[in-house]
Each structure stands twice: as C-alpha cells, then as structure tokens.
Image (cartoon, rainbow, N blue to C red):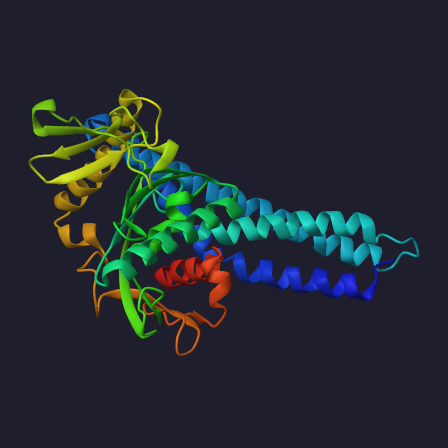
Amino acid sequence: MISDELKRDIQQTIEKMDTALDKLWYEEKHTKIKETEAKCGTQNFWQQSNAKETLKTLSLLKKEVEKFVSIKKNKEELEVMIEIYSETDEPMDREIQRVLNEAKNKLKEWEIERYLSDPYDDLNAFVSFSAGAGGVDAMDWTEMLLKIYLRWAEKKGFEAKILDQTFGDEAGVKSATVYVKGDFAYGLLKGESGVHRLVRISPFDANKRRHTSFALVEVLPELEDVEDIEIDEKDLKIEISRSSGHGGQNVQKVETAVKIIHIPTGITAECQDERSQLQNKNMALKVLKSRLLLFEKKKKESKLKEIKGEFKSIEWGNEIRSYVLQPYKLVKDHRNNFETGNVDKVLEGEIDEFIWAYLKSQKQ
C-alpha cells in the first residue's frame, strides 16, 4: 500500500524524468561519442594541440550518457513499484521513499551536469576582483563582493583561499584573487565574470547621498591539469614585497608576496597568502599559466574579444548585474532579466539562483 501523498510525489518525479530523458539528446550524444572516439583513434592524435581537451570532452560525454541510463532505470523501477505496491495491503512507504529519494538526487545531479558539460567546467577556479569607478565606495563594494563569493563557497563546501589582496587607503579592497577548489567550481562561477554595479546610500558620504559604484569579477579555470604551456623565464618580471594588510601583528615583516608579470602580454598574477616566497611564486605561476592558456586559446580561435568576455571598462553601461539597495531593494541580472528583491540573502552568498539562470540561458 502506498499513501496518496507519496503516490503524487512519485508521479511528479516520473513526469520530471520524462522531461529530462530526451531521446533525441541521447542519440546526439551517442553519435558525438562515436565521432570523438574515431578522432582519438587517428594516428597523429597525440600530435594535436587539443588532444587532452578532446579526451576530456569524451570522458564528460560518457559520464552524461551513463547518468542518462541510470536515471532511466530509476524511472522504470518507480513505475513498477507504484504499480505493484498500489495493490498490496502492506505499508511500503519507507522502502519506496528510499528509492524515490535516490531517484530525485540522481535527477538533480543530472540537471546540474547537463548545464556543466563544457571541457573546463569541472575544474577549480581563480576568481579575481578589481575596484572600478566610484572611489572609496567602489573599493568597499569590491570587498563586499569578495565576501559574497567566500560565503557562497563556504555554503557549497568548497575550499576558498585568498591568494592576494590589496587594501584601499581609506576602506575596502582595491583588488583580490581567490582560489576556489571544488567540483565544477569553474563551471558554476564562469557566468559571474563581468562588471557588478552597486547603488546605495554611501556610508562614506556625510550628506547621505546615493552613490553608484562598480567592481569587476574575472573567473578563470585552473588549467594546469588539462594542458601545459611553456613559459620562458626571460619573459617574466618577478617582484617581491611584504604581504599587505591592515596593520598590527598580522603584517608580514619578511618579503614573501610575489607578483609575476608576463612581459610580452602584460598579464600579471600575484600571491601573498602562502607561508614562503617559493610557495607564493609557485601559486602565482599557476594563476599566470591559467591566464596565458586561456589567452592563447582565444587568440588561436580568432576570438580575442571573448577572453575579456564582459570585462569592459568598469563603469556605467557595462554591468552584467545591478545590486540596488536604495531607493528600493533589487538584484537584477541584465543578461537574462532574472531578479530578486531579497538583497540581504544575496549579500550573504545566496547567488545560486543567478548562477543557474545564467547557465540555463546559455543552453537555450
């Protein structure tokens, strides 16, 4: 016997599975797997610059298909259970609930992974923040954004480490870079790249006037495990300094902070969080390598504009998202018009709705 409430829950879950289990999608993936396997079997495959990327794509495709088959089996199991146990007098809610919960979890994972199937999506991420137009308000806003993403990472159970941080003279943060380690960290965060705009009554204005300030968020994948790139030491300028801070006992008295400049491109990377100069140098090189790899990838594809994505000048007209605290409360993504009035939750790191709205809009 199955309770009416549980039966409705099962039927709703089966309907969701039917929607998700697109036969045409399955056939397209199967075809793509065969085509990719054929590429991997060619004689000169390992001589190709994108060989590792192709293998990564193949692995992700196979995982997607395996998940599809697994969900299909769960759906069939639920259909059989609801038919058999509806006719018995023995209470079966507990057993069926276990199967239903398993099916729901797999379906949720499936929905996530369908939107995170690009080659780099499952990698860790480097997230950089830069203050834009708005003076001290922009630096304060940059620090607020930094805290939003640190809180988001904590809620996700991800490891988040601040690699470098330059503080404002009066308040806030001029720039910072965070290393986010977790499953699909880059895939989830990549849509956050761009200019973020804040409108509020400035806490730094004695006349309590409304101010608008801007900050830039840049998200890069940790590409070291995907492919390699040779960096000529002659092309690097390495600057050593003391780690910055607000003062007091925590300010470093030895020079351990490292900034590396790639002279040909002007691309830079910094790290000051590690204990030694060598550790900071290694982490900064890792950040630099990811930035250079992405730069070269876009350059080869003749899509250099895409490397900056939304990274335009950090001011009016270029924002991807607005956070309005005065005269009303609203956070709105201008790319897909998703919005919420619950600004306080967003400032506490509740940004998943915006992340998924962006990911879904990219797959339409």
Q: Height in image: 265 above or below 107?
A: above
Residue 77 visible (yes or no): no
- Give the quadrant of the C terminus: bottom left
Q: Height in image: 273 above or below 93?
A: above
- Give the quadrant of the N terminus: bottom right
Residue 316 visible (yes or no): yes
Residue at 47% across, 49% down: 151
Task: Name the spot of residue 358 as percent of width and height, x first.
Answer: 38, 61
Q: How many marks?
A: 0
Q: In this view, does 219 lie to the left or right of 348?
A: left
Residue that protrudes farthest toward the right in the picture: 89
Residue that protrudes farthest toward the bottom in the picture: 327
The answer to which of 113 and 245 lies nearer the viewer is: 245
Residue 205: image quadrant is bottom left
Q: Is residue 155 left or right of residue 52?
A: right
Residue 30: image quadrant is top left
